[in-house]
Image (cartoon, grey):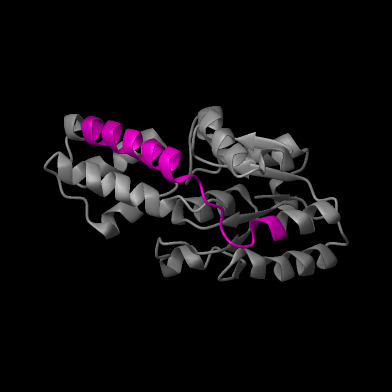
Amino acid sequence: MLDTERVGMRAWRGAAAALGTDLAEHEYYGLIGLDRAACKTYLQRLGWDDRTIEQVGRRAWADYLGMLERDGVRCKNGLFEVLDFLETHGVPRAVATSTKTAVAEQKLQSVGVLDRFDAIVGGDQVTASKPAPDIYQRAAERLGFSPGECVALEDSRAGVRSAAAAGMAVILVPDICPIDHETRALAAYVVPTLSEAIAVIARLIGERGGSLRLPS
C-alpha cells in the first residue's frame, strides 16, 4: 500500500556502505517483508556476523525513519480507489505487516488511511513473522473469518508465501522486488497496479456470492 521499499533500499545499502559492508541490490530484495529476527537470519546466511548486522541494521532503521520524516510517506497509486471500492461493498479490511504495529499505524496515519481499516496486525503481535502464515491467520481472526474466506493483496516474496501458507487467495501486485516463478505460482492473480486489482476483487466477490473478506 505504501511506497516505502525504495526508501528502505537506500537506507540499508547506504548504511552498509557507510560501515564498510556491501549489500547488493539483489541481496536487499531478500529483506523485504521480513521482521527483525528474520532479517538477522537472512543476513547471517549472506555471511554477515552479528556485530555487523546490529550496527548496519540500527543505522539503516534510523536513516529509514529520517527519510520518511523528511520526505513524507507516499502511498501507491490506486490505494484510495481500492479502499473506496471495498467500503462501498461493505468488505472488512485488515493490514497484515511484518512491521511493528505502532510504526505501521504511524505510517498509515500519515497518509490518512489508518481509520479505514478494521484491524492492524504487526509483526510484534505474532511469534513467527512472514513468510510464516501467522500474521495472515491473525488478521483473518481479527476480522472474524477463516483465512479461506479472505484474499490478500501482496507485493513481496515473503508476503505471498505467508498469505498462501495461511490458506488465502493472493493477488500479487509486484513492487521493486523481483518475484521468482515458484512464488508467483502461489498467487491466484498477478496485476501491475492496485487500481487493476479492483476488477479482480469484484470478480471474486461475484464468484463467492458477495461473501468475500479481504485483509489488505
Residue placed at 59% from the left, 62% from the top? 77
Decide whether the magenta segment is chiefly helix, strand or loop: helix
The magenta stretch spans residue 61: yes
The relative height of residue 178 versus residue 111 in the rendered view (above or below) is: below
Residue 189 lies within the magenta run: no
Q: Residue furthest front?
A: 70
Magenta extent: 53-81
Tell whether 107 sits left or right of 113: left
**Residue 156 left/right relative to 16:** right
When asked about the image quadrant of residue 78, the answer is bottom right
Taking the spot 72% from the left edge, 38% from the top edge, the residue there is: 115
Coordinates of residue 199 in the picture (x, y in percent): 73, 70
- Residue at screen point 51% across, 34% down: 123
User: In the rendering, at what x and y percent does residue 67 appear?
Assistant: 38, 42
| Residue 170 appears anywhere in the view | yes
Q: In the figure, residue 179 lies in which quadrant?
A: bottom left
Instruction: Report whether 10 appears left or right of 162.
Output: left
Residue 156, percent from left and from top? 47, 56
Vertical side of 62 occupied by 73: above or below? below
> As displayed, is residue 213 above or below residue 174?
above
